[in-house]
Image (cartoon, rainbow, N blue to C red):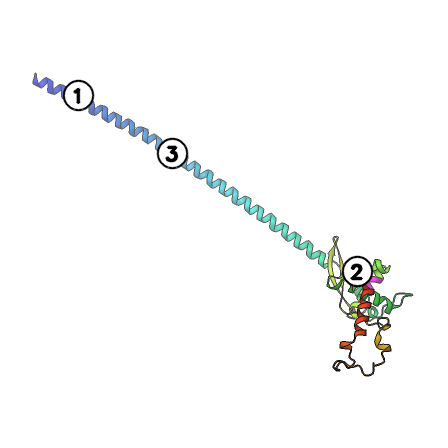
């Protein structure tokens, strides 16, 4: 009787152990199947990420290459435009310095037209004015106007600045030196001043001096007002 009971207990323990072992094996089998699936998923995600990064790098490189090509093309076009000759540059090749300096416009007083050009350009001060606008004011052809500008530049009366205007290269004229004409001295009080012979810049007031002469001061103000009108 006792032996039978022990045998029965042993069988129960063996069954429990077998059941436990089966459960452990089953659990291990589940874990074993999950691990390869997880690893496969991670590998796929890494591959997708690497592919995406490679695509982004390729797109960035393509964009940079396109921008570089565009920039180089723009610089090349700009250089070609700058190297393109203006009518004045073509004239400079056709005429010698002496021919330009001695240039005359038929039936025109060159001293008068020179003073007129300087007077108009000087009104624009350092900003300068487009030579095409000046030729319209003076009713000159582009050819005569361009040669006149070169003549005045040779004499140091104006300077020319090459600029791009409406997709075309032209010049802006800037005054450098206004020539003195007799007309500017016509109303000078010095010509009829009774103490002109005693007048000197080194004199001390009240002795006559152009530095403290009310007549000269009034004359300058009057002439300046005329020019502004």
Q: Give the image quarter of residue 174.
A: bottom right
Q: Is residue 208 left or right of residue 26?
A: right
Q: Give the residue pinned by disc 1.
A: 12
Dot 1 falls on a residue whose secondary structure is helix
Q: Residues within 10 Å of mark 1 (few under 14, many from 20)?
A: few
The quadrant where residue 85 appears:
bottom right
Query: Foreground: 211 or 123?
Result: 211
Residue designated by label 3: 38
The magenta stretch spans which residues?
A: 144-148
Write the residue at 40% across / 36% down: 42
Residue 151 visible at all: no
Which residue is disc 2 drawn over?
Answer: 131
* 172 up-or-down from 14: above or below: below
The answer to the question of whether label 3 and label 2 lie on touching residues, with beta carbons closer than 8 A, is: no
Q: Is residue 42 above or below residue 214?
A: above
Q: In the structure shown, which secondary structural element does the residue marked by tag 3 occupy?
A: helix
Could you tell me residue 21's position as x and y percent? 23, 26
Cα gap from disc 3 to disc 2, whole angstroms: 79 Å
- Which quadrant: the N terminus? top left
Q: Residue furthest bottom?
A: 198
Mark 2 or mark 1, which is nearer to you?
Answer: 2
Tell me which label, 3 or 2, sits earlier in the chain: 3
Residue 133 percent location from the top left of the image: 81, 58
**Residue depicted at x 79% and y 60%:** 131
Q: Which is more N-terminal, label 1 or label 2?
A: 1
């Amino acid at each position: 009787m006792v032996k039978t009971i022990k045998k029965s207990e042993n069988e129960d323990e063996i069954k429990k152990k077998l059941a436990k072992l089966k459960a452990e094996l089953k659990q291990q089998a589940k874990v074993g199947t999950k691990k390869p699936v997880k690893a496969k998923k991670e590998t796929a995600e890494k591959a997708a990420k690497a592919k995406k990064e490679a695509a982004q790098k390729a797109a960035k490189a393509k964009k940079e290459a396109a921008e570089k090509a565009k920039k180089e093309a723009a610089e090349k076009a700009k250089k070609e435009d700058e190297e393109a000759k203006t009518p004045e540059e073509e004239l400079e090749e056709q005429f010698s310095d002496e021919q330009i300096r001695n240039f005359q416009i038929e039936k025109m007083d060159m001293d008068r037209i020179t003073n007129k050009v300087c007077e108009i350009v000087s009104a624009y001060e350092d900003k300068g004015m487009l030579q095409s606008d000046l030729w319209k004011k003076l009713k000159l052809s582009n050819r005569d106007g361009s040669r006149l500008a070169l003549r005045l530049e040779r004499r140091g009366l104006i300077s020319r600045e090459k600029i791009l205007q409406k997709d075309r290269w032209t010049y802006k004229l800037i005054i450098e030196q206004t020539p003195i004409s007799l007309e500017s001295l016509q109303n000078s009080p010095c010509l009829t001043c009774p103490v002109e012979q005693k007048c000197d810049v080194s004199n001390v007031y009240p002795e006559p001096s152009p530095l403290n002469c009310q007549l000269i001061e009034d004359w300058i103000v009057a002439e300046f007002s005329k020019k502004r009108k």
